[in-house]
Image: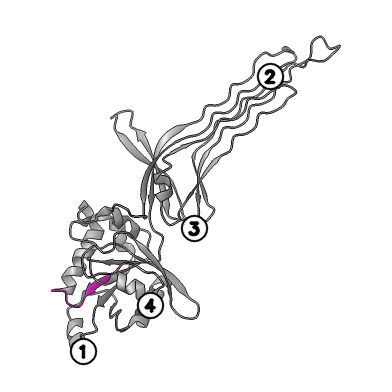
């Protein structure tokens, strides 16, 4: 993965700012021997906030900015002048970013990941750490019994912690198949995406997204995910690193080449890997595309239909020859409407 610009997992350390202290100040005026309290409030410390930005597709910018420290609020001063609030640090992230906080379990002493939230819409904000509130100045504490309070509140402390940010690609349709099943070729034919294509395993090392035009101005987003191999749920091949991208897809398009020894067995192995990674993936709509069918005649296709897995809509396609590509797009569109 060296040199890849696609980063979908990053650990950052963040610190929000302390609130400024309130002021314990007294009015000083000519001819007024004992001016009353007029200490202003402290300003709020800066917060650390994630913000969804559709211009971003990767977390690579955070790979080189792993420390995010906000400034403290200013202290209050005389004449009831409040200190300035510190600026919040707004971190732009791609849509589909999930944040988890590393927290030590007091009983076991082990570090656990606690979900903070996720950002799925443009402009949506997720506060990782709140800045400390500013302290109140001494004029707030004047009372009938205490005309000259010398007390002002200190600012509230900020917070700090380590966070894991994970990107789960947001796409309507996810392509699922073994390496070299024709996923990248299909994406390059149905969209303007330009994935790397070659006849060897793991050409695709990062998810590629493309917008697929169906008809009448309708379109959907398709994600080509690196090939899955048996044992992927245990981390074999490129493993769980990419299986998580499938969690966000509404429809899964399983792709098995026509020259497979057994299409049904291959489909079941793929399905098994997804199930063992996350059983909820079985709730998604599924379709099967038998790829690389340009060398098959109608008679052979009819024979092969008898050996396909049951209960899943299937279509025989050739991306190179354009065979049944529009039909596949229509089927995917229908599945998305359900």
Q: Mark 4 points at which residue?
A: 329
Q: Name the residue under label 2.
A: 138
Q: Where residue 280 sits: x, y (%)?
A: 31, 58
Verify CB contact (< 8 Å) between mark 2 and mark 1: no
Give the quadrant of residue 134. top right
Q: In this view, which residue lies farthest toward the front? A: 3
70 or 265: nearer the eye?
Answer: 70
Other residues around mark 4 within 10 Å, as few (<14) / some (14–19) / many (≥20): some
Please report whichever mark, 1 or 4, sits nearer to the chain's N-terminal start: 1
Q: Name the residue under label 3.
A: 55
Query: CA–CA distance between discs 1 and 4?
Result: 22 Å
Rendering colour mode = one colour
Q: Name the residue under label 1.
A: 297
Q: Where residue 252 sits: x, y (%)?
A: 32, 67
Please report whichever mark, 4 or 3, sits nearer to the chain's N-terminal start: 3
Query: CA–CA distance between discs 2 and 1?
Result: 89 Å
């Amino acid at each position: 993965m060296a040199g890849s610009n696609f980063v979908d997992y990053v650990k950052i350390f963040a610190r929000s700012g302390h609130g400024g202290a309130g002021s314990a100040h007294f009015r000083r005026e000519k001819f007024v021997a004992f001016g009353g309290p007029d200490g202003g409030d402290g300003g709020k410390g800066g917060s650390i906030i994630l913000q969804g930005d559709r211009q971003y597709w990767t977390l690579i910018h955070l790979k080189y900015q792993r420390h995010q420290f906000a400034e403290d609020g200013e202290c209050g001063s005389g004449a009831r002048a409040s200190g300035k609030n510190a600026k919040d640090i707004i971190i732009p992230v791609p849509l589909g970013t999930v944040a988890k906080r590393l927290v030590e379990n007091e009983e076991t002493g082990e570090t656990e990941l606690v979900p903070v939230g996720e950002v799925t819409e443009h402009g949506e904000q997720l506060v990782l750490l709140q800045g400390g509130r500013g302290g109140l100045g001494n004029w707030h504490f004047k009372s009938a019994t205490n005309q000259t309070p010398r007390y002002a509140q200190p600012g509230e402390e900020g917070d700090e912690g380590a966070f894991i940010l994970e990107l789960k690609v947001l796409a309507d349709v996810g392509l699922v198949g073994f390496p070299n099943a024709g996923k990248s070729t299909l994406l390059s034919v149905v969209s303007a995406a330009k994935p790397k294509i070659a006849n060897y395993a793991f050409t695709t090392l990062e998810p590629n997204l493309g917008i697929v035009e169906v008809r009448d101005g309708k379109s959907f987003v398709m994600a080509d995910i690196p090939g899955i191999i048996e044992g992927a749920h245990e981390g074999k091949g490129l493993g769980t690193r990419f299986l998580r991208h499938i969690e966000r897809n509404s429809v899964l398009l399983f792709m098995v080449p026509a020259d497979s020894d057994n299409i049904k067995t291959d489909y079941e192995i793929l399905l098994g890997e997804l199930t063992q990674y996350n059983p909820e993936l079985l709730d998604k709509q599924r379709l099967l595309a038998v790829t690389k069918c340009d060398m098959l005649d109608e008679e052979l296709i009819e024979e092969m239909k008898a050996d396909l897995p049951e209960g899943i809509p299937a279509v025989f396609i050739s991306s190179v020859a354009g065979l049944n590509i529009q039909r596949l797009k229509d089927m995917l569109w229908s599945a998305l409407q359900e």
